[in-house]
Image (cartoon, rainbow, N blue to C red):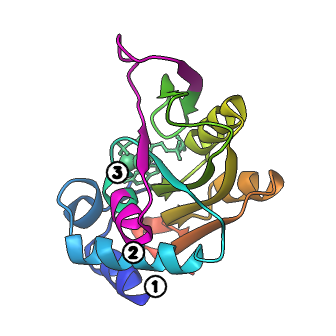
Amino acid sequence: MDKLKTRILQDGKCYEGGILKVDSFINHQMDPNLMMEVAKEFSQHFGDAHINKIVTIEASGIAPAILVGYIMQLPVVFIKKKEPKTMENMLTSVVHSFTKDRSYTVCISADYLTLNDHVLFIDDFLANGNASMGVIDLCKQAGAHLEGMGFIIEKAFQKGGELLRQHGIRYKALATVESLENCEIKLR
Ligand code: G4P
Ligand code: NA
Ligand code: NA
């Protein structure tokens, strides 16, 4: 997706440890026009899949996910990172974030993820794929079918993409970062 790639090269910033900061258009300030273009790309790419629900994980996945849900006219559910006291029929999975070097529990109510669901998962980044493994686990617990995963940006120098391929999961990244070495953003 050319518009996204241009924007990453123009406004993205490299940080220590292979982190790409995109705070000016995705992770803090958001560009709704770019997000809409992103959502259209995902909708087109997964248009042939039989999907009845969009799932994301808070917080940064919510914006693109809700736009995909709007375009595809499907409900959007976000997986939470804090266990709410009042959630009914809660399914949980522990995720260890390599990027942040900490573990956290993700949760979703089994009221909104069931064996009748065919899910498209949407998120901002695919890094080491630990969050994605949590999503796979929650879908398995619920008996839901994970039809595909869409990421705005994949960092190909980390192992998330490989992990998803190993699990036989269909996924799409709209921009792929090959390297951030010497603080130079190299896109595929
Ligand atoms: P991990 O296995 O390496 O920990 O990666 P994972 O895909 O689980 O991502 C952990 C968190 O770090 C995610 O967001 C993800 O979006 C973010 N992340 C990973 N690499 C990068 C990067 O290079 N740049 C940016 N900006 N974010 C990255 P989160 O912090 O858990 O949540 P939120 O931002 O959606 O609230
Ligand atoms: Na995220
Ligand atoms: Na993030």
- Residue 78: numbered disc: none
Left/right of residue 82 with respect to residue 180 in the rendered view: left
Q: Earlier in the sequence, mark 1 or mark 3?
A: 1
Q: Work out whether residue 176 can be spotted.
A: no
Q: Earlier in the sequence, mark 2 or mark 1?
A: 1
Task: Identify residue type, mark 1.
Answer: Met
Above or below — where is 55 with respect to 179?
Answer: above
Residue depth check, mark 1 versus mark 3: number of the one nearer the observer: 3
Give whichever of 171, 101 is nearer the camera: 171
- Residue 1: numbered disc: 1
Residue shown at 60%/61% (left/top)? 51
Mark 2 vs 1: CB contact within 8 A: yes
Queried whether the magenta region covers residue 84, the answer comes back as yes
| Classed neighbour count for the residue bearing mark 1: other residues with Cα under 10 Å, few (<14), some (14–19), many (≥20) | few
The part of the chain drawn in magenta is 66-94
Task: Give the CA separation, mark 2 to mark 1.
Answer: 8 Å
The answer to whether mark 3 is within 8 Å of ligand 1 is no
